[in-house]
Image (spheres, rainbow, N blue to C red):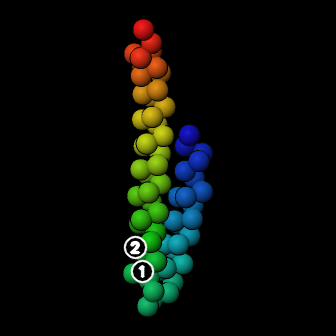
Amino acid sequence: MMKKAYPYINSAALILLSGMTVSRAGVFYHIIGVGFIISAALITIGTVMSSVRKPDSAAGYQP
């Protein structure tokens, strides 16, 4: 589950590093990088929570 988020985090880090080198578009790339990091964190949290809740919900819905 965590391996799926590594490409997003790596791309976000590359965007942040490339954004810091460019002075004019640095803020723009920084916002994009932070957005990628937040989205990757939400994706990982969502996958972990859904994988944790699936067995409980499946066992609960069985009659």
Could you classify mark 2 by the number of other residues whose Cα lies within 10 Å: few (under 14), some (14-19), or many (20 or more)? Answer: some
Do tag 1 and tag 2 residues touch (Cβ < 8 Å)? yes
Q: Is residue 28 above or below residue 11?
A: below
Q: Nearer the viewer, residue 54 or 13?
A: 54
Q: Residue at x 42, y 43 (%)?
A: 45
The residue where tag 2 is placed is: 31
The residue where tag 1 is placed is: 28
Q: Secondary structure at mark 2?
A: helix
Residue 18, label in figure: none
Instruction: Report which quarter residue 38 is drawn in.
Output: bottom left
Q: Position of residue 11 (x, y in %)?
A: 57, 65
Q: Secondary structure at mark 1?
A: helix
Identify the amino acid type marked 2.
Ile
Q: Is residue 60 above or below residue 4?
A: above
Q: Residue at x 42, y 80 (%)?
A: 28
Identify the amino acid type marked 1.
Phe
Q: Position of residue 12 (x, y in %)?
A: 51, 65
Q: Position of residue 13 (x, y in %)?
A: 52, 66
Instruction: Report which quarter residue 2 is drawn in.
Output: top right
Q: Is residue 37 above or below residue 41?
A: below
Q: Is residue 27 left or right of residue 8?
A: left
Q: Nearer the viewer, residue 11 or 39?
A: 39
Q: Nearer the viewer, residue 52 or 16?
A: 52
Alpha carbon distance from label 1 to label 2: 5 Å
The N terminus, quarter of image: top right
